[in-house]
């Protein structure tokens, strides 16, 4: 059972994402939520780093937080899986422990 | 008369800070003081099109930005590097803006009498 990492701050205002990715282990999962969803923009400067980490980590993004910020499905980096609130609960149940980064 | 410059650097939908800053900005403008807005860093996300904060139960902020023109605030400056780093283009913003290069920001700031960080 891998760790679920929660990153809720934008990469533009916090180093939380890169600090998380530096410590995440093989088989862990990452869920981007709140301002953290900006990291999923495929044309952003941090996309290459996120893409590279997806070799060992499953990356998810919270759909309602994307919608609130006007990020359409075709703007999201390929391979990042969109989940709804029920999916968030599912990830919380299937991973342990859960670590928040903000 | 004092030239005001409001500098927005925070992303949207994180508390009521931006809403309060816009209240202050409109108050300043209502007293006929010249106001400019500058969007830097994650602040450029404030103007991204397609935002739907209602799905989080939050109030939309876009109408407040759209009302700026009514207050005679027409100078919206957006740093081009901040847009590019986030994969955004001027066309993906909700309002017409003026582009400014990072190297020119210092001059814009220096030309203001009062700078308000948002």
Image (spheres, coloured by chain):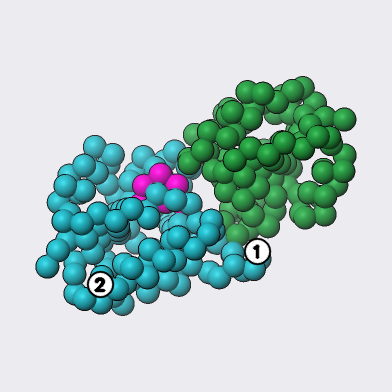
Q: Residues within 10 Å of mark 1 (few under 14, many from 20)?
A: few
Q: Is B23 drawn above or below residue B91 in the view shown?
A: below
**Residue that appears at 20% across and 57% down:** B114
**What label does residue B25 carry, if any?**
none
Chain at numbered mark 1:
B
CA gap between label 2 and label 1 equals: 31 Å
Q: Quadrant of residue A6?
A: top right
* Colour of chain A in the image: green
Quick one: which chain is cyan? Answer: B
Q: Is residue A5 above or below residue B118?
A: above
Q: Which residue lies at the image location 57% right of the left edge and 48% below the top edge?
A: A35
Name the residue that disc number 2 marks: B29
Q: Residue B62 location in percent, x, y?
A: 47, 67
Tell me the residue at 20%/49% (across/down). B108
Q: Is residue B43 in the magenta section?
A: yes
Query: Residue B56, labelled with which disc?
Result: 1
The segment highlighted magenta reads B39-45
Name the quadrant containing residue A53.
top right
**Residue B117 drawn at (x, y percent):** 33, 53
């Amino acid at each position: 059972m891998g760790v679920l990492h929660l990153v809720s701050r934008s990469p533009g205002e916090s180093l939380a994402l890169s600090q998380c990715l530096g410590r995440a282990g093989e088989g862990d999962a990452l869920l981007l939520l709140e301002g953290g969803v900006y990291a999923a923009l495929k044309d952003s400067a941090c996309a290459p780093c996120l893409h590279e980490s997806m070799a060992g980590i499953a990356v998810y993004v919270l759909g309602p937080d994307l919608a609130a910020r006007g990020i359409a499905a075709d703007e999201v980096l390929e391979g990042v899986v969109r989940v709804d609130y029920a999916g968030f609960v599912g990830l919380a149940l299937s991973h342990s422990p859960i670590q928040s980064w903000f | 008369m004092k030239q005001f410059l409001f500098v927005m650097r925070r992303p949207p939908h994180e508390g009521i800070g931006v809403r309060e800053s816009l209240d202050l900005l409109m108050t300043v403008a209502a007293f006929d003081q010249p106001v400019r807005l500058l969007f830097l860093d994650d602040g450029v996300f404030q103007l991204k099109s397609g935002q739907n904060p209602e799905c989080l139960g939050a109030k939309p902020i876009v109408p407040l930005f759209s009302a700026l023109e009514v207050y005679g605030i027409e100078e919206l400056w957006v740093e081009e590097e901040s847009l590019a780093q986030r994969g955004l283009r001027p066309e993906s913003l909700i309002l017409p803006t003026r582009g400014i290069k990072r190297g020119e920001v210092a001059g814009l700031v220096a030309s203001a009498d009062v700078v308000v960080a948002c």
